[in-house]
Amino acid sequence: MENQGYTTSIEVSKSGREVFNHINDVAKWWVREVAGTSTEFEGESSKLNDEFILRHGDDHYSKHQLTEVIPGKKVVWLVTDSRLNWIKGNKQEWTGTKMIFEIIPKEEKTTLIFTHEGLVPQLECYVHCVHFWERIIKEWLFNFMTDRGLKSNI
């Protein structure tokens, strides 16, 4: 059965191991200033059962646990707690969802397939989150992996 959620992908000229290492260095590709507020990272994000928190002002709080870590192949984050204060309804829509990073090396390139399992169109945050994931994965993480710098015009 296919995972229910939002999926996107990128391809980079890196090994599966390099892509894996970049994914796990969350603070270097996710933390930045957006709309005048800086994102904060706290915790660890490199091995099984590590936990970390991402906080963006009062708008976004999410606590993640690494529940699957297969070097060079896959990383899974379970959202154990969340508060999306910018939505009107259930501010904990992310709680219990998973961010899945599947790494598929092929010759000189590697494809990264990202799925936010549980992020479905019925959720109030869906449209905004899909837009943001497109930026986070296809710009921030891609640029970090390809050494194009961490600056992004937001």
Image (cartoon, rainbow, N blue to C red):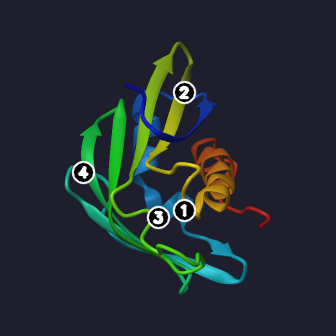
Q: Which residue does the numbered mark 2 point to in the structure image?
A: 111
Task: State the residue at coordinates (60%, 48%).
Answer: 137
Q: Which residue does the numbered mark 4 point to in the structure image?
A: 47
- Mark 2 residue type: Thr
- Mark 1 residue type: Trp
Mark closer to the observer (3, 2): 2
Describe the element under mark 1 as helix, strand or loop. Answer: helix
Describe the element under mark 3 as helix, strand or loop. Answer: helix
Q: The N terminus lies in which quarter of the figure?
A: top left
Picture disc at residue 27: 3
Q: Which residue does the numbered mark 1 point to in the structure image?
A: 30
> In the visual, does 2 lie left or right of 148?
left
Residue 73, x across and y down, in percent: 36, 30
Picture disc at residue 118: none
Residue 15 vertical position relative to residue 114 in the rendered view, above or below: above
Residue 41, x across and y down, in percent: 43, 73
